[in-house]
Image (cartoon, rainbow, N blue to C red):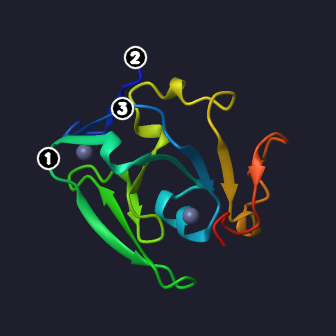
Amino acid sequence: MDDGHTGGCVCGAIRFETSGEPLRVTICHCTWCQRRTGTAFGTEVVFETHQVRFTGAAASRYRHVSDESGRWLDVAFCPTCGSNLGFTLEAAPGLRTLPAGIFDDPAWIRADRHTFRHVWLRSRRDWSDLSDTVEKYERHFRS
Ligand SMILES: [Zn+2]
Ligand SMILES: [Zn+2]
């Protein structure tokens, strides 16, 4: 069974491989994700930390502390090309995210196969349309 997936940053200095299925895909419409991604939402494929192995150059990290929860998120990014490499967060120990777009072949991430959760819809842009079939939360499903 081929359940491993590879990906990496734009310049290729940082690569990763995953094993097994992700827990879920969280699509976050919060204003922080809008700013850090430069678009309407962040699309985070959520894995347990041990399922993800990085190779190549070391990622840079930026710690953001939420002004709402007071908890930190450590964002990883390539120091050369700036690609977003996902984050770890204080609120969910043992988990890390990888943005859906940095996989070599993102086609394996499928709405009919994985759980998609849309969170922080209270700050969703009105030009960011949602399907009727996805899970939706005005705030986070943990809050
Ligand atoms: Zn890079
Ligand atoms: Zn967010």
Examine the image and state in which quarter residue 140 appears: bottom right
Comes first in the chain, label 3 or label 1: 3
Identify the residue position indicated by label 1 in the image: 57
Amino acid carrying label 1: it is Ala
Image x and y of residue 63, in percent: 34, 73
- Residue at disc 1, CB closer than 8 Å to ligand 1: yes
Identify the residue position indicated by label 3 in the image: 19
Of the 4 image quadrants, the one containing the N terminus is: top left
Cα separation, mark 3 vs mark 1, equals 20 Å
Q: Is residue 18 above or below residue 90?
A: above
The residue shown at (27%, 65%) is 61
Instruction: Judge the density around disc 3: few (<14), some (14-19), many (≥20) Cα neighbours within 10 Å.
Output: some
CB within 8 Å, label 1 to label 2: no
Identify the residue position indicated by label 2 in the image: 2
Residue 105 appears in the figure: yes
Image x and y of residue 52, in percent: 32, 42
Comes first in the chain, label 1 or label 2: 2
Looking at the rendered structure, the secondary structure element under dot 3 is: loop
Comes first in the chain, label 2 or label 3: 2
Amino acid carrying label 3: it is Ser
Q: Is residue 97 above or below residue 120?
A: above
Looking at the rendered structure, the secondary structure element under dot 1 is: loop
Which quadrant contains ligand 1? top left
Instruction: Judge the density around disc 1: few (<14), some (14-19), many (≥20) Cα neighbours within 10 Å.
Output: few
